[in-house]
């Protein structure tokens, strides 16, 4: 398990991380979600041991990452801003990775270059942005890491390659128990592959749950009691309403309740309309991070 407790970091007097707590279970795919500048990249660079925190603790199954070369050899990282030495080919890079990662898998490296149609002898500087991303995935996955940290990993990849890359990743989670933390703005991808979600804002964790819990406890509903709605009593008493807005006689809400419990509460007042609507991860994200009058949130409902 990756555990982060009370992590804080300042840059030029600005607090980038503010007492952040995070728990990434072993063998899980954990999605880190937040707006630009929320602190996602800062967290990943701390987890990779590139930056040292001002306060707090980072723990990988009982080991600290800072200046821990043995642990770092078990961590694979793909940053948003890729770097390859000038003039290097994929074959040159494979030699570098083989010397740094004791579990380097040459068979997988050749298999991935073949499947992704990457020329091992071609200079990486001549690759497109998407090909460079594929090249980095090939190198990092061939290192057979126990922990994989991904910062916006799929930018520039076409849909077919995205599916191939995710397949390699999910297979390693299933077969080897690899632990993955992925930061991305593509919430559709996150919803499809992640089993845990952390939403951060201004360097703090505002919501951390497994995705199944989100899907079973948070619901989007619309209710109407028509023109004969009861007055003097609250038909929603007992509901934990996270967001509510009205369109004529129809109330649209996000609630944090068991759906059968919500159904019983609402049915007491005999509604003429009661529908359960699909609630996406994008809507959860916008609700958690948008203000009550946020224009973006209004577009969702």
Image (spheres, rainbow, N blue to C red):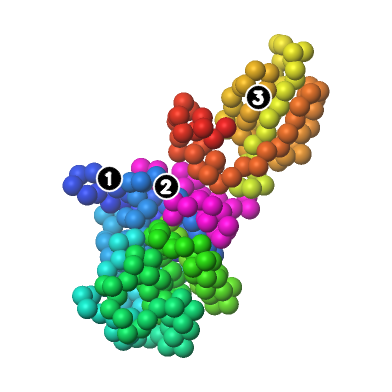
Q: Residue at x 40, y 59 (%)?
A: 155
Real-space Cα separation, disc 1 to disc 2, in angstroms: 16 Å
Is-magenta flag for residue 185? yes
Residue 143 visible in the picture: yes
Position in image of residue 23 (x %, y %): 48, 58
Q: Secondary structure at mark 3?
A: strand
Upstream in sequence: badge 1 or badge 2 = 1
Disc 2 and disc 3 in contact, CB within 8 angstroms: no
**Residue that label 3 marks:** 251
Left or right of 243? Residue 111 is left
Disc 3 and disc 1 in contact, CB within 8 angstroms: no
Residue 57 visible in the picture: no
Q: Residues within 10 Å of mark 2 (few under 14, many from 20)?
A: many
Left or right of 84? Residue 22 is right
Q: Nearer the viewer, mark 1 or mark 2?
A: 2
Q: Residues within 10 Å of mark 3 (few under 14, many from 20)?
A: some
18 vs 59: above or below: above
In the picture, the quarter occupied by the C terminus is: top right
Residue 34's mark? 2
Q: Secondary structure at mark 1?
A: strand
Real-space Cα separation, disc 3 to disc 1, in angstroms: 39 Å
Q: Nearer the viewer, residue 208 or 160?
A: 160
Magenta stretch in the rendered image: 184-213
Residue farthest along the top direction in this orientation: 232
Upstream in sequence: badge 2 or badge 3 = 2
**Residue that label 1 marks:** 15
Q: Nearer the viewer, mark 3 or mark 1?
A: 3
Q: Residue at x 45, y 38 (%)?
A: 289
């Amino acid at each position: 398990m990756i555990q982060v407790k009370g992590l804080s970091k300042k840059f030029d007097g600005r607090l980038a991380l503010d007492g952040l707590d995070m728990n990434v279970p072993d063998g899980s795919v954990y999605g880190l979600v937040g707006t630009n500048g929320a602190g996602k990249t800062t967290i990943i660079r701390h987890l990779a041991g590139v930056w040292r925190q001002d306060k707090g603790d980072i723990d990988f199954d009982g080991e600290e990452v800072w200046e821990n070369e043995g642990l770092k050899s078990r961590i694979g990282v793909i940053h948003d801003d890729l770097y390859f030495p000038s003039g290097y080919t994929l074959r040159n890079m494979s030699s570098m990775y083989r010397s740094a990662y004791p579990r380097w898998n040459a068979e997988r490296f050749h298999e991935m270059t073949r499947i992704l149609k990457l020329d091992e002898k071609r200079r990486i500087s001549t690759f497109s942005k998407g090909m460079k991303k594929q090249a980095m995935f090939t190198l990092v996955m061939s290192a057979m890491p126990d922990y994989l940290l991904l910062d916006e990993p799929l930018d520039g990849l076409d849909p077919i390659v995205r599916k191939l890359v995710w397949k390699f990743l999910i297979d390693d989670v299933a077969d080897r128990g690899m632990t993955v933390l992925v930061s991305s703005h593509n919430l559709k991808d996150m919803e499809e592959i992640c089993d845990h979600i952390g939403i951060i804002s201004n360097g703090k964790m505002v919501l951390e749950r497994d995705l199944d819990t989100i899907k079973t406890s948070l619901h989007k509903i619309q209710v109407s009691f028509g023109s004969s709605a009861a007055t003097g009593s609250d038909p929603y008493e007992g509901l934990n309403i996270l967001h509510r807005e009205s369109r004529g006689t129809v109330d649209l809400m996000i609630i944090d309740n068991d759906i059968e419990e919500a159904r019983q509460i609402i049915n007491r007042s005999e509604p003429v309309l009661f529908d359960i609507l699909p609630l996406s991860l994008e809507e959860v994200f916008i609700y958690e991070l948008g203000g009550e009058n946020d224009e973006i949130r209004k577009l969702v409902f």
